[in-house]
């Protein structure tokens, strides 16, 4: 695996525990986890179901908070931000790509991509222009007026990626981005992510079960029972 | 403004459910508008009643008559500006269903006491010159398509004529207008002198007096002084503000305001459940979408506002259409064909309708909105 990371640490996870409570039962998903991700890296996170991959992704993306430990992104302790500041931070620094696309069914591709820009001070014309550029990057300019139900799975995921990159975020977090796609459409998505990493220097963290998908990343880490390792651990 | 399309696009999600909810809200506001006009019809007299006017009637009941010579005695009381008398005629024009108020009056006194009745000088002169002359309000004239010069026959139920006849014939010499929207233009006035000389009995007796006081703040004192003046006489009086007197008439039918309020409360409570149910389903079905909005940076308060905005859009569309249809129906006229002296939706009730729309939006949307606000992104995305 080669890396284009420039060595500067963008994400630093230190001694992170995550405990979920279900009634009186406590479930330890992550325990004392440390991780550093340099700027410009394309990291694949693999591991069995329930290993804590998505939980780690949520912590790095500011969608959840650790029970213990610190999460720093770009030198900022995001786990200490208030809910309001954390939401503003996500809007500015994080692009999210979901397994099931999570597009608004009542909005066209163009309007879906514009959604994160509603939180900016951009004019309607500027929002439209930026959404058009993002759709162009993912090769969907000709489908801008179509609704999600009129798009194939691959096209929906590309729309999801356009929505994730439209604000030019620091960090792109992808949770099983090819998990709901066939091989061909999945490869197209991986090509796109790889291009975003190589050509635009986006730092990407991708959670995946798929070895084929992980091979596109510059580094792969395996998570099992809340612990990270560079190679798969026997289960 | 930039969130409008997001709010309205939410309503397009389940078109049938949204349409049915809007339809129910619309029906509620049609009812609100229409019932408001009916309540206004009953309250109109009370609202336009002069604060400086008192009504003096027989202490026992309104159908007991008072001597006409009380007028001079009342006018002599300190604080009284002037007094005019009126008498209920209660005749039938063609058929009992064609009910309207008919009263004998002294022309000069009538317009002096009721400046809200606008009659042209030409019509006034014609009335003064015609003993059998009568004037009708614009609403009444239009109701029966009366024109100046028409001879109006009215069958007496109370006041027979000296010649034994019961049909009184009046010449329509004037049509008066109302100075305000709520002024009653459904009344019919004819000359008292003609009435008094023609009636078979009751000469010199009148139904009640309308009294103007010089200082409205002292109306209660003047009322007490009038009643004291006639205390222990054969015809004792009861004096009350004009508004209370008219309200007493309306209350003979029932407490219209209370009845209408009860109906509206039941309707709005039911519609609130419908709208609340729709909003609850809307949020429940879109848990992951709302979580995505939060994930991309919408704040908790932002998501709360979006859900409340959607609730407002839902009720605003239904409520505005409903109020519009109610206004249209009311503009088509009095459903009783003339029993209501006025029939319209007052401007203040339009504003009340808008307030109700906002209140309904808030109550229907607040619980689902709070639920959306509290949504934990990571949990919601897992669902």
Image (spheres, coloured by chain):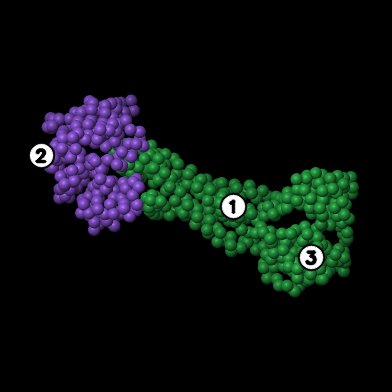
Chain colours: A purple, B green
Which chain does the residue under circle 2 lie in? A
Q: Quadrant of the C terminus of chain B?
A: top left
Disc 3 designates what residue? B190
Residue most toward the bottom? B149
In the figure, is residue A75 to the left or right of B157? left
Secondary structure beneath label 3: strand
- x, y percent for residue A216: 13, 42
Which chain does the residue under circle 1 lie in? B
Disc 1 designates what residue? B348
How many C-alpha atoms fall within 10 Å of the one at disc 3: few (<14), some, or many (≥20)?
Answer: many
Measured in 3D between alpha carbons, the distance from the residue under mark 3 to the one under mark 2, in whole angstroms, is: 108 Å
Instruction: Tell if the residue under mark 1 belongs to the same chain as the one under mark 2.
Output: no
Which chain does the residue under circle 3 lie in? B
Instruction: Tell if the residue under mark 3 belongs to the same chain as the one under mark 2.
Output: no
Residue B53 appears in view: yes
Secondary structure beneath label 2: loop
Is B41 situated above or below A81? Answer: below
- x, y percent for residue B333: 61, 63
Q: Residue at x 56, y 53 (%)?
A: B350
């Amino acid at each position: 695996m080669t890396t284009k990371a420039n060595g500067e640490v963008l994400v630093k996870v230190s001694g992170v525990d995550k405990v979920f409570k279900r009634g009186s039962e406590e479930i330890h998903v992550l325990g004392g986890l440390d991780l550093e991700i340099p700027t410009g890296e394309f990291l694949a996170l693999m591991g069995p179901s329930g290993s804590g991959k998505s939980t780690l992704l949520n912590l790095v993306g500011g969608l959840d908070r650790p029970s213990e430990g610190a999460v720093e992104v770009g030198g900022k302790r995001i786990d200490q931000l208030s809910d309001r500041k954390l939401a503003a931070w996500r809007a500015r620094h994080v692009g999210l790509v979901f397994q099931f696309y999570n597009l608004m069914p009542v909005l066209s591709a163009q309007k879906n991509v514009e959604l994160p820009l509603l939180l900016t001070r951009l004019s309607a014309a500027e929002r439209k222009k930026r959404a058009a550029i993002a759709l162009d990057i993912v090769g969907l300019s000709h489908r801008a007026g179509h609704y999600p139900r009129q798009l194939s799975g691959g096209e929906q995921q590309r729309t999801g990626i356009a929505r994730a990159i439209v604000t030019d975020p620091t960090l792109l977090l992808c949770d099983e981005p090819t998990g709901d796609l066939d091989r061909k459409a999945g490869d197209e998505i991986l090509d796109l992510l790889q291009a975003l990493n190589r050509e635009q220097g986006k730092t990407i963290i991708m959670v995946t079960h798929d070895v084929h998908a992980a091979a596109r990343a510059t580094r792969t880490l395996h998570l099992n029972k809340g612990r990270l390792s560079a190679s798969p651990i026997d289960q | 403004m930039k969130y409008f399309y997001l709010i309205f696009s939410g309503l397009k999600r389940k078109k049938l459910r949204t349409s049915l909810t809007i339809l129910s809200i619309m029906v509620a506001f049609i009812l609100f508008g229409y019932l408001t006009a009916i309540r206004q019809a009953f309250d109109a007299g009370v609202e336009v009643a002069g604060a400086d006017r008192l009504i003096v009637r027989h202490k026992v009941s309104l159908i007991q008559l008072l001597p006409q010579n009380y007028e001079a005695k009342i006018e002599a009381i300190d604080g009284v500006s002037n007094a005019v008398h009126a008498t209920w005629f209660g005749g039938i024009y063609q058929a009992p269903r064609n009910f309207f108020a008919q009263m004998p009056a002294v022309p000069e006194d009538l317009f002096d006491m009721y400046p809200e009745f606008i009659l042209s000088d030409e019509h006034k002169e014609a009335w003064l010159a015609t003993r059998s002359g009568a004037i009708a309000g614009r609403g009444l004239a239009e109701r029966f398509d009366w024109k100046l010069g028409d001879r109006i026959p009215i069958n007496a139920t109370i006041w027979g004529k000296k010649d034994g006849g019961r049909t009184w014939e009046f010449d329509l010499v004037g049509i008066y207008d109302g100075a305000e929207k709520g002024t009653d233009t459904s009344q019919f006035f004819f000359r008292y002198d003609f009435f008094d000389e023609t009636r078979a009995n009751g000469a010199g007796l009148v139904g009640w007096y309308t009294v103007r006081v010089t200082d409205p703040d002292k109306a209660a004192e003047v009322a007490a002084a009038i009643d004291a003046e006639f205390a222990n006489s054969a015809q004792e009086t009861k004096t009350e503000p004009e508004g209370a007197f008219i309200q007493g008439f309306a209350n003979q039918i029932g407490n219209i305001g209370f009845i209408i309020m009860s109906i509206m409360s039941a309707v709005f409570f039911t519609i609130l459940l419908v709208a609340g149910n729709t909003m609850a389903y809307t949020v429940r079905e879109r848990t992951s979408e709302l979580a995505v909005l939060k994930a991309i940076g919408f704040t908790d308060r932002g998501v709360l506002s979006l859900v409340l905005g959607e609730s407002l859009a839902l009720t605003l569309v239904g409520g505005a259409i409903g109020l519009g249809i109610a206004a249209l129906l009311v503009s088509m006229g009095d459903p009783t064909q003339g029993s209501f002296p006025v029939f319209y939706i007052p401007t203040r009730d339009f504003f009340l309708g808008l307030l109700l729309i906002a209140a309904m939006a808030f109550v229907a949307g607040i619980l689902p909105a709070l639920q959306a606000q509290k949504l934990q992104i990571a949990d919601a995305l897992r669902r």
